Amino acid sequence: MRGFAIGAGVQQRDVHATAHLDTFARDNLPPQSQWPHFQFTRPELQYPPRLNCVTRFLDRWVQEGRGDALCAMSLTQSFTYREFQQLVNRIANVLVNDLGLVTGGRVLLRSANNPMMVATYMAVLKAGGIVVATMPLLRAKELAYPIAKAKITLALCDGKLKDEMEKARAVSPDLRHVLYWGNDDADGLDARIAAASDHFAAVDTASDDVCLIAFTSGTTGDPKGTMHFHRDMLAVCDAYATNVLRADASDRFISSAPLAFTFGFGGVLFPMHIGASFIVLEKAGPDDLPVAIERFKASVLFTAPTSYRAMLARYGTHDMSSLRKCVSAGETLPKPTFDAWLKMTGLKLMDGIGATEMLHIFISATEDEIRPGATGKPVPGYEAKIIDENGQDVADGVMGRLAVRGPTGCRYLADERQTRFVQHGWNITGDTYVRDKDGYYWYQSRSDDMIISAGYNIAGPDVEAALLTHDDVVECGVVGAPDDARGMIVKAYVVLRPGRAGDDALVSGLQEHVKREIAPYKYPRAIEFVPQLPKTETGKLKRFTLRQMASGS
């Protein structure tokens, strides 16, 4: 058995018997020697050996007599905790009885943010399965990779996204069943739900059974599948939400982040952890959020700095006075944005940094401890430090690599890159930071090729690969360029084939080509044609030089 016993922060082998009949995920965890050193020293982070996280997020509120409390809302639907539990139970019965899901089986979910996406997510977990949630904008070839990597045989998908899903299905021999909702298919998910029982007992899973495989954006090479346990889902709530966010059952959460992002799903887990309610929006741009905040009287907002900047201009036209807590993550929070939001609303933006590998935020600060411009301090339950390239601790005030450890951490699915992210028991996040003498952490930059634009993580090599499929492109390099509105934008430096001149028409043509090849939000908003790319003597692309060019330095 792989895993760690919980208690005293001591690393040791666990004795938790898995409930998984399909042991693919457990069999493909990295060797235990490559795991980070997990910390469970705080009392709120003590979990029993047997645990299905949905019992804590959903079932207990009904059992405790709070089933009539409001749980989920959208522009067209609302559910109490009892109604949402019944929906989840029906879906779980369909998964197990109709589709043959066995414990440990992986289920791909594909949808925009809506109550059904949340319900399918919870149903898979409750049935002892493993969720693989995907972005609704991904193209077929981007979907085919996690399907193959995680050996996924079953997918649940919003009917509006059927076309691309079917293209992925055609090239994915492992995928045997795809069930759609939101259509009139007599054999679709809606029809099966209507005929299913609304009673389902949560599977008796181990606290260290894998329940989620979240894929990264793929900074270098293919995306990495990060595996998280049932206890991890609770740990991010008990560590960050309880100790830093400090919301209560009367709060209404709203978020712009896609539920396929672990940051976005925190906007669902955190309220369900305390019996509060949440609002999910299929469209949650800066024009949509203020309208929904006013309509639903939302009190806790999760979005990116880019969105906060854009909403400043709309604050006077919509009543957003119900807001009392505003969390900023997904990209660095500029101090001018913090200052402007505070001046306009009287609310301090709560900055934070998380990672797919860590599941959610691990450095932040409570509202009374915020230091504008700093990300904050380690969330209670986590430790952090700054190291140099050799892994040695550096002094306060010296820039270096961020290392962190706590109750959650990196476990890649069958991936040799595990040893890059985890070194000497610490998670090396790929961020460059400075720690001051008071223990506050100040973000400097990414240490890798990730471009964070308007809260979306975009891998430069992913965009390069798409551009190189165009007949006119010989070489290209993609980096992030500073942008006032989006924080960063994707900028491509392109070498064209001989005789082809770069002009505005070709810029538009390349941008549309990328949108067809990969998720449209990844397209390069700026393209510069160059005669050659900067390279090392061995022919490697000098990305640092491109980043200097993009920043104007």
Image (cartoon, grey):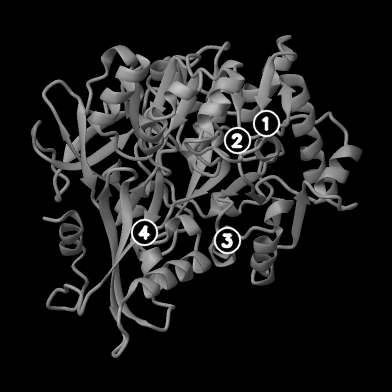
Q: CA distance from mark 1 to mark 4?
A: 31 Å
- Is the residue under label 2 in contact with that under label 1 (CB below 8 Å)? yes
Between circles 2 and 4, the one closer to the viewer is 4
Q: Residues within 10 Å of mark 2 (few under 14, many from 20)?
A: many
Which comes before the other along the chain, label 3 or label 1? 1
Query: Would residue 320 be seen by someone viewing this image from the given angle?
Result: yes
| Residue beneath disc 3 | 143
Which comes before the other along the chain, label 1 or label 4? 1
- Is the residue under label 1 in contact with that under label 3 (CB below 8 Å)? no
Q: Residues within 10 Å of mark 4 (few under 14, many from 20)?
A: some
Q: How many marks?
A: 4
Q: How far across and how far down the image is residue 459, in percent?
A: 37, 58
Taking the spot 33% from the left edge, 43% from the top edge, the residue there is: 485
Q: CA distance from mark 2 to mark 4?
A: 26 Å
Q: How far across and how far down the image is residue 496, in percent?
A: 30, 81
At label 1, the amino acid type is Leu
Which comes before the other along the chain, label 2 or label 4? 2
Residue 69 vs residue 407, the one in the foreground: 69
| Residue beneath disc 1 | 75
Between circles 3 and 4, the one closer to the viewer is 4
**Residue 137 sits in which quadrant?**
bottom right
Q: Is residue 467 left or right of residue 267?
A: left
**Residue 163 sits in which quadrant?**
bottom right
- Is the residue under label 4 in contact with that under label 3 (CB below 8 Å)? no
**Marker disc for residue 281:** 2
